[in-house]
Image (cartoon, grey):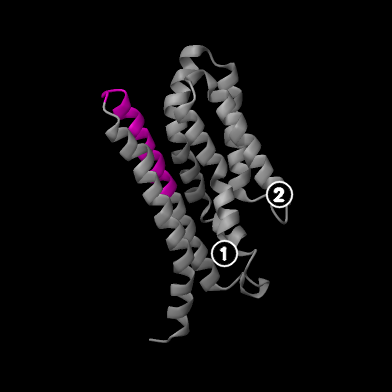
Amino acid sequence: MKPLPLILAFLPLVAFSLLARYLPSGYIGLAALVSAALALIVIVTARPPWPPKILNACSLVLFSVLAVLGFTLGKGDDSWLATWGGAGVGIVIGLVILLLVPVMPFTEQYARESTPQAYWGSPTFKKINRVLSIGWGAAIVALGVSRVSAAAIGEHTASRLPQLVFSLAVPVVIIVYMLKFTKSYPDRVTHSEAVPG
């Protein structure tokens, strides 16, 4: 699996998380609009562009809805949306990834780009993509929980350290681990199945 298309698929989530965190709360609609535009760019520039990847399509829909809410809600409501929506969007995307595993693991679409079609139906290919999708789904949920924790802590303390740990350090560690796992796991599985007993 090529890492660049997978990284690009998460770009709207990363952009939204950063913009929602650092822009004033009245700009949550703009943060979501930028993220929806990024999701659309990722969809249009992907090869093949049709059908769109599940993760990209879900990101486009989610951030479009958040943009509409951000532009139409009143000042108090968009402040709540900026604080909790900005932090919680990872939980939503992670749960969508996990719910789609029985239908089609989202990593399968990316793996097909670099795997010959003859292997797409193999049990090994299916197993690798189920495990990777479960791993990514759980990681994105954990990232979301970490960001929600940072938002909750931020409301009750003036100290920036807990917020930095939960909103920056923990997510970076999770993402770096998952990128390494995504790169190494398929080789481990194919090697262990090639070597009997």
Which label number is shown at residue 119?
none
How many angstroms separate mark 1 from mark 2 (CA)? 18 Å
* Numbered disc 2: secondary structure: helix
Which numbered dot is residue 1?
1
Q: Residue at x 48, y 29 (%)?
A: 20
| Predominant SS of the magenta segment | helix
How many other residues sit within 10 Å of disc 2, few (<14), some (14-19) or many (≥20)? Answer: few
Write the start and end of the magenta stretch as one range.
139-158
Q: Position of residue 158 (x, y in %)?
A: 27, 23
Q: Nearer the viewer, residue 96 or 46?
A: 46
- Kind of element beneath mark 1: loop
The residue sitting at 47% across, 25% down in the picture is 82
Q: Position of residue 100 (x, y in %)?
A: 53, 51
Disc 1: CA contacts within 10 A as few (<14), some (14-19) or many (>=20)? some
Q: Residue at x 52, y 40 (%)?
A: 13
* Count of marks placed on residues: 2
- Residue 104 drawn in magenta: no
Q: Mark 2 sits on what residue?
A: 45
Instruction: Determine whether 132 is above or below 55 in the image.
Output: below
The answer to whether 116 appears left or right of 185 in the picture is right
Quadrant in the picture for the C terminus: bottom left
Residue 178 against residue 191 in the figure, above or below: above
Please, what is the three-letter code of the amino acid marked with disc 2?
A: Thr
The amino acid sitting under disc 1 is Met
The answer to whether residue 145 is visible is: no
Q: Position of residue 33 (x, y in %)?
A: 61, 30
Q: What residue is shown at x 44% (from left), y 21% (from top)? A: 80
**Residue 140 magenta:** yes
Q: Would residue 123 be visible to someone looking at this image?
A: yes
* Between discs 1 and 2, the one toward the N terminus: 1
